[in-house]
Amino acid sequence: MSETSLTPTVPSGQVGAAVRGRFPVFRDKVYVNSCSQGALSDAVRAAYAEYLDGWDENGAEWEHWVERSEAARAAFAGLLGAAPDDVAIQTSVSAAVSGLVSSLQFRGERNRIVISGNEFPTIGQIAHAQELRGAEVVHVQPDPEAYAAAIDERTALVCSTFVSYRTGAVHEVEAIYGLAREHGALMLVDGYQGIGALPLEAAKAGDVVVGGTVKYLLASAGLAFMALRPGLVEELVPVQTGWFADENVFDMQIERYRPHRSARRFDAGTPPVPNIYAGVAGVGLIREVGVEAIQEHVRGLVARLAAGLDELGAKVATPPLGPLVCVRSTDSPALVAALAADDIVTSERDSNLRVSLHLYNTEDDIDAVLAALARNRRLIL
Ligand SMILES: Cc1ncc(COP(=O)(O)O)c(C=O)c1O
């Protein structure tokens, strides 16, 4: 089956009620939890079915799997304005960042990794693991001034999230990248919490941009990507590797380490084939609708939510500029449970209720969340 037959066409800009019917979860739930997991669409379900059908009909569709992997690479590249040769297919952000740091040296004067308090745990933990290889980790407040004070000629790597998973803050990654460049440091952007709902041009954001398909790219766990600045790949030789990183995977040679000339040198083992089917469908849906159209739609919903929260006297963790709005709570697990009892799906981190909005959400969803919060006033700060 071709890719186009898998993914029913959505006219560009169709968001909210126009697209919602393709996400069955909305039959029973107000789903505002894309920061944890994007909702399942008909297209992604069909992609999994296609994978299983091919397995039944043909057994190992090896060449088709490799082709699907390349389709995923091209889809991620298109989303980020990168060339497919600069994009590595990964199974998680953790795997991508571990591969990346395996290609860096943390010896001598330039051994520092700068990270902000808004980074996802995997970034902090991988950074600290590099202490075993001579790195020194510098923690900064999540703002450009703090980054500016910390980045200097001793900095090897600067890490910034795009959107904070715990506060919803949108980092000024382009400004931080400028600082990194000024001092000859490499800049890594973790785009997981924004890519798909906010535009991000990889080359403007950082030297390396990572993300995955679980959230705003509407697919499942087990597929991620890493986009490298053009030309950077030639400078990076990962020691975390595998046969899919070889110059020619079909050679099956065991004589030498021959990293591929492109970002494929960061691909490692057998590609996560089922997740790739799903990922191509999820990213396809986002690209058909258009990230700008999604951003515009989400902006309107966020403004409605922010105004309602204000009226309720609720506090937000940070001014909401992206798809994730974090509401301060006196007992965030109890608030998530109270909303769940009303069929509203949310999540929580750090005493914040997380409400995250995407292409399929509507004003009715916002009003339902606000009404439920009004009924649970005692649980908001
Ligand atoms: C900002 C961010 N980075 C990374 C991840 C996940 O990383 P991994 O793909 O290694 O599980 C998440 C998942 O919640 C996230 O929110």
Image (cartoon, rainbow, N blue to C red):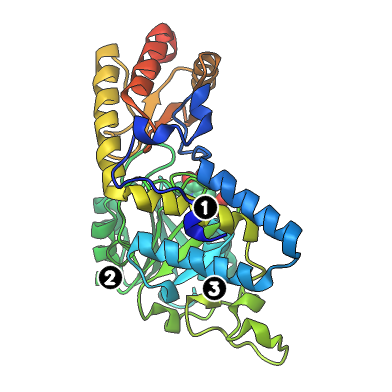
Image quarter (top left, top right, bottom left or bottom right) of the C terminus: top left
Q: Is mark 2 within 8 Å of ligand 1?
A: no
Please tell me whether mark 1 sits on a helix, a strand or a loop.
helix
Q: Is residue 134 visible?
A: no
- Residue closer to the observer: 53 or 353: 53
Residue 278 on image: x %, y %: 56, 52
| Three-letter code for the amino acid on which mark 3 is drawn | Phe
Q: Residue under label 3, please give it.
A: 266
Front of the two marks 3 and 1: 1
Residue 66 on image: x %, y %: 60, 71
Q: Residue under label 1, please give it.
A: 6
| Three-letter code for the amino acid on which mark 1 is drawn | Leu
Q: Residues within 10 Å of mark 2 (few under 14, many from 20)?
A: some
User: Which label's residue is closer to the chain start, 1 or 2?
Assistant: 1
Q: Residue at x 71, y 92 (%)?
A: 255
Q: Is mark 3 within 8 Å of ligand 1?
A: no
Image quarter (top left, top right, bottom left or bottom right) of the N terminus: bottom right
Q: Residue at x 37, y 59 (%)?
A: 79
Please tell me whether mark 3 sits on a helix, a strand or a loop.
helix
Residue 58 on image: x %, y %: 73, 65
Relative to 2, residue 144 above or below? above
Residue 132 on image: x %, y %: 60, 66
Relative to 352, 269 lies left or right: right
- Residue closer to the observer: 66 or 150: 66
Kindly report the distance in space between the C-alpha atoms of the residues bearing marks 3 and 2: 23 Å
Relative to 187, residue 264 above or below? below
Callout 3 touching callout 1 (CB < 8 Å): no
Tell me the tag on residue 181: 2
